[in-house]
Image: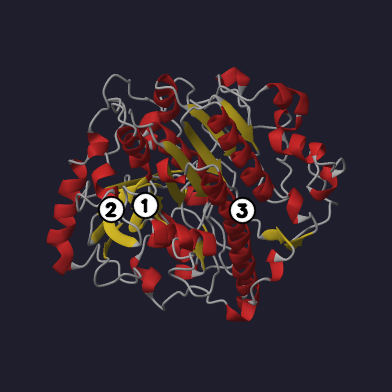
């Protein structure tokens, strides 16, 4: 009897700190993700390849670095002719679906520049368009999308259609108006939108429906359940907004003098009115290039709500996992949980994200469950990277990996048959409109960050200094280590041209 090819269920959050699972952090409750850890393997050294949403998500589906697939920053569209994981799986008979957040295209179109985006206004609120368009798109034959975070005006697409189907005809009252109205009410922490109408509930409900549809059609599936939270704004419905007491939260800290050893833009984040103009190529602001000063009470409240957003998401993820059991397909479904990049909650004096390649931003929660194939209740410190997901999924399905993919096959590591598949992880950052352009190389012990056209950089010994307090870049005793890391980085896989696909000149 021929064995059925495995289903693939990829579950991601958005901007989640690696240490926000109950199994590692007693301050937060995530029973369903904890169950996933108990039934699978949790990888403690997983990293993104870009700490920015669009490039990271594009890398996930292409198996290519941002400098190669072309979506190298937010505001740059992922070319629609780049080969994707879904393309290969569809040819092999898989149903491929994306439910939730995509963010492969920018919030602004530039028709004259040849960049037309579906993820921009007013298209986002053109519900008749979305009623008729559910794919194909980037290798997904079926899509159901929502672009907004919390009550942002970017709301619309399939999520808004669902809200109307659920009887919430006045859904616009719960979101910022478009075009923006300066007199619109400001919401923070508590959202009066009932949880049954929240996009987290929608993502779970529609993911389950698409899984059921694939099972009914007797087709193997690749489904990406792409949750939007806990990306700011820090806003969530009751009861999740008050689930955690701010007084119990533990913000990250900045050690006195630690930023003196860092590149200059780090220290400027601690100024009340920093001047970031030397790092700007255009007048517009950018992630992280602002003052990170925040009152302790406000930060604690943000963390409490951030945790509540994760716990709400965990409950909905539990619904999806339960559906696999109810449908009798859990045994033959590969489940991976991760996020696109991390988040700062006061660590090093920083908030949210930016051009700061600390572990808090690059490192990810990462869990793999495949019953009977992946060891249960295990932990692994082998290096993992989002760029590896596409080739590993294809290998698990018995399919050849296209030569255009630059990631490595982690299947043997996932199954516990091999201690590691890579000795270095690479993360890129080039985010318009800043002139900051950096690349980080991470090994088991050391971590190196280089800046284009700059003499400063970063070198951390993660074994002796896991909290990254002491930058060794200018340390004379670490000169040989720095030179060796630079040599290795120049010979890394990112410098090797992928096969059968032209290099993207503008990246």
| Left/right of residue 51 with respect to residue 403 in the rendered view | right
Q: Are marks 2 and 3 in contact (CB under 8 Å)?
A: no
Let me know if residue 356 appears in the view: no
Secondary structure at numbered mark 1:
strand
The image position of residue 315, as x and y in percent, is: 61, 58
The mark nearer the N terminus, 3 or 1, is 1
Q: Residue at x 79, y 57 (%)?
A: 186
Question: Number of callouts in the render?
Answer: 3
The image position of residue 155, as x and y in percent, is: 72, 40
Up/down of 87 relative to 302, above or below? above
Residue 230 placement: quadrant: bottom right
The mark nearer the N terminus, 2 or 3, is 3
Q: Which residue is drawn at 30% across and 56% down?
A: 457
The image position of residue 303, as x and y in percent, is: 59, 68
Secondary structure at numbered mark 3:
helix
The image position of residue 126, as x and y in percent, is: 76, 27
Work out whether residue 106 or residue 198 is closer to the camera in this orientation and state it: 198
* Residue on which disc 3 sits: 316
Q: Nearer the viewer, mark 2 or mark 3?
A: 3
Residue 106 placement: quadrant: top right
* Residue on which disc 2 sits: 383
| Left/right of residue 253 with respect to residue 493 in the rendered view | right
Q: How far apart are marks 3 and 1 (CA)?
A: 25 Å
Q: Nearer the viewer, mark 3 or mark 1?
A: 3
* Residue on which disc 1 sits: 47
């Amino acid at each position: 009897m021929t064995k059925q090819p495995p289903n693939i269920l990829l579950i991601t959050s958005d901007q989640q700190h690696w240490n926000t699972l109950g199994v590692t952090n007693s301050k937060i409750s995530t029973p369903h993700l904890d169950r996933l850890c108990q039934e699978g393997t949790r990888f403690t050294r997983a990293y993104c390849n870009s700490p920015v949403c669009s490039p990271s998500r594009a890398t996930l589906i292409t198996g290519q670095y941002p400098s190669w697939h072309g979506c190298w920053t937010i505001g740059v569209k992922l070319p629609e002719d780049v080969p994707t994981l879904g393309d290969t799986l569809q040819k092999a008979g898989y149903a491929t679906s994306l439910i939730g957040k995509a963010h492969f295209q920018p919030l602004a179109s530039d028709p004259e520049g040849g960049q037309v985006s579906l993820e921009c206004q007013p298209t986002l609120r053109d519900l008749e368009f979305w009623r008729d368009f559910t794919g194909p798109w980037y290798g997904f034959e079926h899509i159901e999308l929502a672009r907004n975070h919390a009550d942002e005006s970017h709301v619309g697409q399939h999520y808004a259609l669902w809200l109307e189907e659920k009887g919430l005809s006045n859904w616009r009252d719960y979101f910022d108006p478009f075009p923006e109205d300066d007199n619109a009410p400001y919401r923070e922490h508590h959202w009066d939108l009932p949880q049954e109408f929240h996009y987290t509930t929608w993502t779970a409900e529609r993911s389950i429906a698409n899984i059921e549809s694939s099972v009914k059609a007797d087709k193997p599936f690749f489904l990406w359940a792409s949750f939007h939270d806990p990306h700011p704004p820090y806003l969530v419905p009751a009861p999740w907004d008050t689930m955690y007491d701010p007084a119990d939260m533990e913000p990250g800290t900045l050690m006195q003098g630690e930023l003196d050893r860092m590149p200059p833009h780090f220290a400027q984040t601690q100024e009340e009115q920093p001047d970031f103009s030397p790092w700007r190529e255009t007048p517009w602001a950018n992630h992280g290039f602002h003052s990170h000063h925040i009152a302790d009470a406000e930060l604690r409240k943000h963390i409490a709500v951030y945790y509540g957003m994760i716990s709400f998401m965990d409950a909905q993820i539990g619904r999806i996992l339960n559906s696999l059991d109810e449908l009798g397909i859990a045994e033959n479904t590969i489940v991976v949980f991760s996020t696109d990049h991390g988040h700062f909650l006061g660590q090093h004096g920083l908030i949210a994200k930016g051009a700061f390649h600390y572990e808090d931003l690059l490192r990810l929660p990462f869990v793999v469950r495949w019953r009977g194939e992946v060891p249960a209740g295990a932990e692994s410190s082998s290096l993992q990277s989002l760029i590896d997901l596409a080739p590993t999924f294809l290998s698990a399905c018995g399919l050849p990996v296209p030569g255009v993919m630059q990631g490595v096959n982690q299947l043997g590591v996932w199954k516990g048959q091999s201690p590691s598949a890579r000795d270095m992880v690479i993360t890129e950052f080039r985010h318009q409109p800043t002139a900051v352009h950096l690349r980080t190389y991470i090994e088991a012990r050391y971590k190196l960050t280089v800046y284009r056209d700059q003499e400063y950089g970063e070198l951390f010994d993660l074994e002796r200094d896991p909290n990254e307090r002491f930058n060794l870049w200018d340390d004379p005793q670490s000169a040989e280590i720095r030179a060796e890391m630079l040599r290795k980085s120049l010979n890394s896989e990112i410098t090797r041209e992928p096969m059968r696909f032209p290099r993207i000149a503008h990246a």
